[in-house]
Image: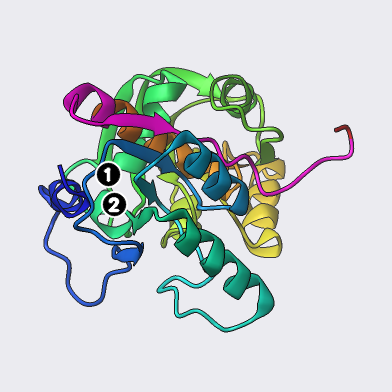
Amino acid sequence: MKAIELIEELKNGAFELSGRTCDTVKAGNPEKEIGKVAVAMFATVDIIKKVKEWGADMLIVHEPTYYDHFEEMLVNPVTEAKKKLIEESGIVLFRYHDFMHHRPIDQIPEGEVHYLGLKGKLENTPYSASYMYHLYEPITALDLAKLMEKELGIKHVKIAGERNKKSTNIALCFGTPGGVYDLLRDENVEIVLTGEICEWMLGEYARDAALLGYNKSLIVMGHIGSERDGMRLLAEKLSKKHTSFETKYFECGEVYTYTEE
């Protein structure tokens, strides 16, 4: 199979996109035959080196490689050095973002919920890449955060607002999608899960709401922690579906380090 054939397969089944997409080949020849496919959240410098050592022909990532959504690369020593490293690797680098989200079942929350082991019903919201998840069994924000640290390997999950009241209505706003503030203020939403926030707006709203007696929680997972398991599930699916090439998930790790390390 050629890289371009796998790319077309990944796009298949997604809703038609209007306007510009960031899902393009960032490096390498898409006509290349693939024997090993690596999957990761980010094409960090460490990831590029690891997948090259593994012998990958192709690397599929979810987020930008050059620090801009459409990767309109500003020339500076960091981007130039990284570009050289990628080009020398010979790897076909493909970003799989828009087509991953714009599907009947968004593959990012599918992966996060799958590895958390939470059972419930997923529903769309009016906001792009944000969903409601109605749990069959209630859980507290504190127990949910502990579950994330255990099952998703997130180093430090942050909770703003109520910690100990059981909830069933959870808004899934993984990464940094639209509608987070709207869903947090929705009286039918008890817990909002997201990747990154503006603390003075979202964090303080959740804290005050809880202090006023509302069952309202905001759980901040970090951008990587809130989306990478969608990529992990993608690697698992590709591995099961395709035997003509080898697929392996590579963990890029969290962007932050901590004092206890």
Query: Which residue is depicted at the point 54% across and 27% down?
Result: 152
Count of marks, rendered view: 2
Q: Secondary structure of the magenta portion, mostly? A: loop
In the rendered structure, the answer to whether residue 19 lies left or right of residue 65 reads left
Task: Quarter of the image for the C terminus: give it.
Answer: top right
Residue closest to the eye, 183 or 43: 43
- Residue lying at the far right in this picture: please name it: 259
Contact, mark 1 vs mark 2 (Cβ under 8 Å): yes
Q: CA distance from mark 1 to mark 2?
A: 5 Å
Quadrant housing the N terminus: top left
Q: Toward the viewer: 116 or 216?
A: 116
The residue under label 2 is: 101
Question: What element does badge 1 sit on?
Answer: loop
Q: Position of residue 212 (x, y in %)?
A: 68, 45
Residue range (magenta): 238-259
Quarter of the rendering containing residue 119: top left
Q: Residue 208: give x, y in percent of width and height.
A: 70, 50
Q: Quadrant of residue 245?
A: top left
Residue 173 among those drawn in magenta: no
* Mark linked to residue 106: 1
Q: Which residue appears at 82% of the width and 40% of the height? A: 258
Q: Amino acid at mark 2?
A: His
Q: Determine the image quadrant of residue 128.
A: bottom left
Q: Around disc 2, counting alpha carbons within 10 Å, would you say few (fewer than 14), some (14 to 19), or many (20 or more)? A: some
**Res 192 visible:** no
Nearer to me, 223 or 242: 242
Percent coordinates x, y for residue 86 in the rendering? 49, 60
Q: Amino acid at mark 1?
A: Asp
Is 220 drawn above or below residue 66 in the view shown? above
Horizontal side of 4 relative to 219 (left or right) equals left
Q: Counting other residues with Cα less than 10 Å from the Cα at mark 1, is it few (<14), some (14-19), or many (20 or more)?
A: some
Q: Position of residue 225 (x, y in %)?
A: 56, 40
